[in-house]
Image (spheres, helix red, strand yellow):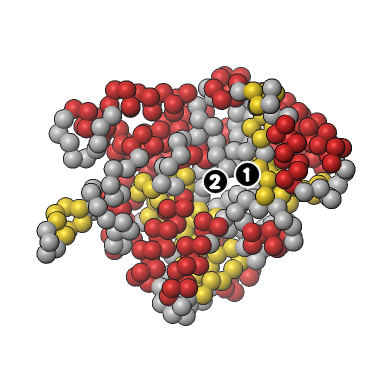
Amino acid sequence: MQNILQHTAFNIVEVREDFPILKTLVNNKPLIYFDNGATAQKPKQVLDVIIKYYTEENSNIHRGVHTLSQKATIHYELAREIVKKHIKASSVNEIIFTRGTTESVNLVAHCFGKLFINKGDEIILSVMEHHSNILPWQILCEERGAVLKVIPINEKGELNLNEYKKLLSAKTKLVSVSHVSNTLGVINDMKEICALAKQKNIPVFIDGAQAIPHMAVDVQDLDCDFYCFSGHKVYAPTGIGVLYAKEKWIEIFKPYQVGGGTIKTVSFEKTEYADGPLKFEAGTPNIEGAIGLAAALNYINEIGLETISAYEHELTQYATQKLKQLTNVIIYGDVANKASVISFNVKGIHPFDVGTLLDKQGIAVRTGHHCTQPLMQYFNIPGTIRASFAFYNTKEEIDVFILGLEKAIKMLS
């Protein structure tokens, strides 16, 4: 593949300058940050708007008539508009701000489950799901007497869609699947998954936490009912997330939590709740988080998601080829259609030990089960070493990572 730097305006030197933390030393070594699947670093453009908010506009939103409140409200609601455009939703009324993917899943499990899940009903997940997209549904099924059904995978980590078709039935009330596996990086064919469910009028929930940083998402084209993601994985602050829900669901769902901001009128006899997403945003929201998320989305759109995707794909291919040259390295999810995540092990060596020695060399990777224990059980392993790349990473960093890995393997063998 022709180097992406040769045919785009993408300038890796300038990009890295936008991320102050990349100048950090770890154990007296330059930081090499390959843990972007857990959380991404923040550019100055995001940090600056947060500082601006707290130094020039800090106020509560929606109910104040004074100038600061009006400014904060405008920027908070502008963030909703930016999210709507980014995922190509049809209306801002379909965009709910949450604390992150986890709260988004819990919100739908609570609201949907209360209305539609009964004894004997079935919810379909996949074996590669993050615990956050398992536990809320599991609790719901336990409470309601419903049943979880699981889409299996093949040895490469790809979903078996033929088995998925067999699982869909009159008992199926919801399908909830991750767009991209946080452990394997495998990109699931969500359009096909949604289309098969729609043939039986079954709603689909998509966990997009690992997809949003790496690719363009069009919720209308997917025709999903729900789509969620976390800000901190897409270069925004922690504690902010998004739940997209088709307006028909927002209209019929009752509030997940209640309190200030969720109401029109309150009396001791009866309360009338707000319309649209505000019904689900109880209390003072993460205002700076929403503003920071908008800045992060604007930032990646200025670079271009197509450019980001191509560059990260190049990094992933390069690192994969380098890893395959090492003896005793096993790569999981080694498929063509994947995001910038490589999950691997070294035969005879525990992943934790490798991760610890890499950290001594200033290289940050993730080790463990990555909150996907059922997936680990499928592969019959305790965990993996996961290197996850962002567009501010470089091939030179990968070279240092490979040398560091070779050193760690030699020390542990």
Determine the residue positioned at 58% across, 33% down.
Answer: 308
Locate the C terminus and report the quarter of the image it occupies.
top right
Locate the N terminus and report the quarter of the image it occupies.
top right
For numbered disc 1, what is the local secondary structure? loop
* Residue 11 percent location from the top left of the image: 59, 21
Q: In this view, does 188 lie to the left or right of 212?
A: right
* Residue 226 percent location from the top left of the image: 42, 56
* Residue 148 percent location from the top left of the image: 53, 71
Which amino acid, by three-letter code, is at mark 2?
A: Ala
Q: Which of 352 and 328 is in front in this view?
A: 352
**Residue density around tag 1, few if under 14, some if 14–19, many if 20 or more, within 10 Å:** many
Determine the residue positioned at 51% across, 43% down.
Answer: 212
Determine the residue positioned at 41% across, 46% down.
Answer: 99
Q: Distance between the residues labelled 1 and 2?
A: 8 Å
Residue of label 1:
339
Please count the marks in the image: 2
Q: In this view, does 413 lie to the left or right of 134?
A: right
Which amino acid, by three-letter code, is at mark 1?
A: Ala
Visible residue check, residue 235: yes
Q: In this view, does 361 lie above or below 241?
A: above
Q: Which of 211 and 85 is in front in this view?
A: 211
Q: Quadrant of residue 381?
A: bottom right
Residue of label 2:
211
Q: Is residue 337 left or right of residue 171?
A: right
Q: Is residue 167 above or below residue 220?
A: below
- Which is more N-terminal, label 2 or label 1? 2
